[in-house]
Image (cartoon, rainbow, N blue to C red):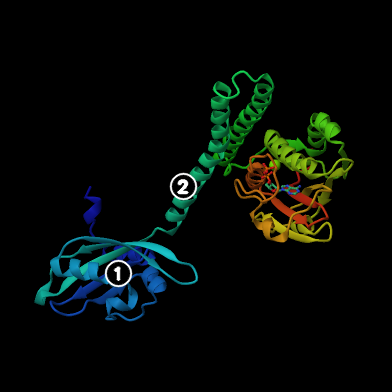
Amino acid sequence: MSDLADRPGAGPAAQLILELLPEPVILVQGADGEPPEIAYGNRAAREVFRIELAGAPLGAALRRPEVLEAIEGALATSTNAEVAFETIGVQPRFWRAFARPLETGEGGLRQLVVMLRDETDARRTERMRADFLANASHELRTPLASLAGFVETLRTHAKDDTEAREKFLGIMAQQATRMARLVDDLLSLSRIELNEHIAPSGRVDLARTIQDVSDAIRPLTAERGVTIAVTADPDATSVTGDRDQLVQVIQNLVDNAVKYTPRGGRVAVALVAAPSLEAARAPSRTGVGLSLLSPDSSDRQAYVVLRVTDEGPGIARQHLPRLSERFYRVEGQRSGGTGLGLAIVKHVVNRHRGGFAVESAEGEGSTFSVYLPIAPAQS
Ligand SMILES: Nc1ncnc2c1ncn2[C@@H]1O[C@H](COP(=O)(O)OP(=O)(O)O)[C@@H](O)[C@H]1O
Ligand SMILES: [Mg+2]
């Protein structure tokens, strides 16, 4: 068997492969003292850099002086070069160019291959990772700093002050609880993300699950003087899903609704059948509505819509698009939460191939809707 690298007859196939490569490849050539020109560009190169004719100057494709300089240098000295650059336009992109010289041909014509790699997505992911780490550290640090401060006070100034000690210990307990909740939510979120690409396969009775969740928070609602009213369309109870994760979805939405509803108010939790995606996304009330997540499917999928409506302060329009971002909290609202609840909801719903939307207006409460593919009828 021959070596794969020099398989006979690979010529035309290699040409075809080059043409079909998703990343741009350019062959550059130039005689000594002449400005380099483009001898060939594969399809990706022609599309990305809008080059049409062979013989065009390299500067027509790669306009950045530092990139041209690096490539011209590599061509003149027959050495490798690597340079990163950015293209501006409707969508800025980050590139890395690798220049590799070929052997010098007849008449001193030098040739060089420039391969380009699109690093935009990698950059963006890296950026998100760094931002997330910075945010998470900051969120953990705040309660930690407060704890450390009170420990110091208890050791010094408040050493013999019983009343102050009780008060500070109470605050410390709260801060410790807050940190624990943050760590729990971070762990949940990372677990959900780990299997987000694997669709759940269980069958979940949502009406039952809602009942279980609202029973569990009854002590809290009683203390707050808020009632929860549950209604369920008999056709809309079961979905294909992961019960534990759907419990988290309901819990987060109901917790928020209860938290923001004033004493004596009411939280409505409704399950509604929707025969199509369009029906599932239809507005349920007046006010501004915004989709926070939409499923890809556009077929005749039927959904179950879970709708949680509160009588809270409502949310101003400009905050709506950011609600499901990690750590995002509306300023001026001291939620005492982690800011991760709606991010968890979004990721769970995404795993379930469902959708998530909010409708709200200042002074008119909020409605959060989650829609999930209905479970096929049981035989
Ligand atoms: N029902 C609601 N009414 C008003 N504002 C809400 C409601 N639900 C969520 N929000 C706003 O969205 C933010 C993010 O919610 P969430 O991710 O659950 O975080 P947390 O509840 O931990 O603050 C909240 O801090 C709050 O500002
Ligand atoms: Mg919350």
Q: Secondary structure at mark 1?
A: strand
Relative vertical location of residue 134 with respect to residue 176 in this rendering, above or below: below
Q: Is residue 227 left or right of residue 142?
A: right
* Percent of width and height locating residue 339: 64, 43
* Percent of width and height locating residue 361: 79, 58
Q: Which residue is mark 1?
A: 26
Looking at the image, is mark 2 or mark 1 earlier in the sequence?
1
Q: Is residue 239 left or right of residue 145?
A: right
- Whether residue 356 is visible, yes or no, is yes
Relative vertical location of residue 365 with respect to residue 258 in this rendering, above or below: below
* Percent of width and height locating residue 183: 58, 33
User: Which residue occupies the extreme left position in the image?
Assistant: 107
Kindly indicate the quadrant of the structure image that contains residue 342.
top right
Q: Secondary structure at mark 2?
A: helix
The answer to whether the beta carbon of the residue marked 2 is less than 8 Å from any atom of ligand 1 is no
Please count the marks in the image.
Answer: 2
The answer to whether the beta carbon of the residue marked 1 is less than 8 Å from any atom of ligand 1 is no
Q: Which residue is mark 2?
A: 130
Bin the neighbour count of mark 1 within 10 Å (Cα to Cα): few under 14, some 14-19, many 20 and up: many
* Residue drawn at x 28%, y 69% as measured from the top left: 66
Amino acid at circle 2: Ala
